[in-house]
Amino acid sequence: MTLVLGIETSCDETAAAVVRDGEDILSNIVASQVDLHAQYGGIFPEIASRAHIEQIYPVVEQALETAGAALPDVDVITVTRGPGLAGSLVVGVNMAKGLALGRSLPIVGVNHLEGHIYSLWLAGPEYRFSRSDSPSADGEHIPIEFPVVILIVSGGHTELVLMTGHGEYRRLGGTLDDAAGEAFDKVGRLLGLPYPGGPSIQREAAQGNPSAFDFPRAWLRGNQGKQNFDFSFSGLKTAVLRALKECDPEYVTDEPVSEMIPVVDMAASFQAAVVEVLVGKTIRAADEHQAKEIFIAGGVSANTALRSAMVAEAGCPVRVPPLSLCTDNAAMIASAGYFRFSAGERDDLSFDVLPTWPLTR
Ligand code: KG4
Ligand code: ZN
């Protein structure tokens, strides 16, 4: 048995978790800073790193306590090394180094995006969906089969990745401008909805008409006219702004929206445009690479419209993480680190954070 302590501080969640053998969560503690940042409508980096400093020690302590474990029981410490905010990453990395040094434990630095991917190793059989099965069929555990096409959609990233084995990735495409979650957050702000925009837009969209506004879908074509696997969301955001000004010529961002703005219809139409492109490109990539499964990971994978459209349209099973593992957490970092540790990987104590670390090296 291998007990892994995972630590994650790449953005605005201070998180620690204890995971057994890469798949069993014994504890998963997340201290969110969302309320601290809500007043700025986005993440304020210096406030984030200072809040991590305050939270990291109690969060790690609580993760061990909840797991019924003490540091001497831990076999390896895994920590997010990047990508993320430098001032936030260093807090987790220094905590991990201190613990590793104090207890002579091995340490493995983990890529945050790889962490999101491994949230699917922590998801039970009820999170594997296919058109023919009912989602929680008989609770049978069906092992993950490669190759897998993965859509990583978070506040900072939108990437389409082909995974052919543990730690083996090929990037198929990604966003050329805003990340999908960033688009949700920016449009949420335009519509005067609370931060973060993703859950707010989903809530409003549930009461709106997704065909009310014909917002653009950026299918993006390569030089032979063939659609590629890249994404672009900034044009969509501009289209929403234009529609807002058409509905209310007096519209000003960051002021309460007037009654002339059909917020629910705009939210539904925006969400439909994002979902259509994310689903369309992911399914085409899965078909082209004969994927055995599709994964959706990252904060935006919490979106119910995205989940249900992917499951309804995919020709292969789709795995999505439980809601608690969609957004940033340390259990996914522990799981990803476990597979690297098992493959013999170790880092020495001199490693630095990598704020722009790509998944594919
Ligand atoms: O993965 P995550 O917690 O942090 C990053 O690594 O970025 O993702 C946060 C993002 C935010 O942009 C948030 O608006 C979005 O995930 N999000 C959602 C939903 N829940 C969170 N977007 C759409 N629908 C949701 N239900
Ligand atoms: Zn994330």
Image (spheres, rainbow, N blue to C red):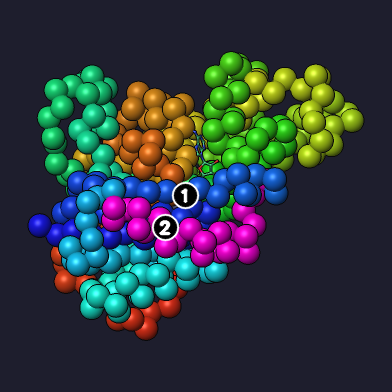
Question: For numbered disc 1, what is the local secondary structure?
Answer: strand
Question: For numbered disc 2, what is the local secondary structure?
Answer: helix
Viewed as shown, does residue 328 lie left or right of 129?
right
Instruction: Work out whether residue 342 can be spotted.
Output: yes
273 or 140: nearer the eye? 140
Q: Amino acid at mark 2?
A: Pro
Residue sitting farthest toward the right: 250
Viewed as shown, does residue 276 lie left or right of 42?
left
Picture residue at 22% right of the left edge, 24% below the top: 136
Picture residue at 22% right of the left edge, 51% below the top: 68
Check residue 58 for magenta coloring.
Answer: yes
Viewed as shown, does residue 331 lie left or right of 356?
left
In terms of image quadrants, where is residue 71?
bottom left
Check residue 302 for magenta coloring.
Answer: no
Q: Any mark on residue 31, and which?
A: 1
Q: Any mark on residue 240, and which?
A: none
Above or below, comparing residue 78 to residue 122 in the picture: below
The residue where tag 2 is placed is 58
260 or 33: nearer the eye? 33
Few, some or many residues within 10 Å of mark 2 (<14, 14–19, 20+): some
Disc 2 to disc 1: CB gap under 8 Å: yes
Above or below, comparing residue 262 to residue 331 in the picture: above
Few, some or many residues within 10 Å of mark 1 (<14, 14–19, 20+): some
Which portion, as a residue range, is magenta? 41-65
Viewed as shown, does residue 193 lie left or right of 231?
right
Q: Mark 2 and mark 1: span between their CA atoms?
A: 10 Å
Picture residue at 77% right of the left edge, 34% below the top: 242
Residue sitting farthest toward the left: 1
In terms of image quadrants, where is residue 274?
top right
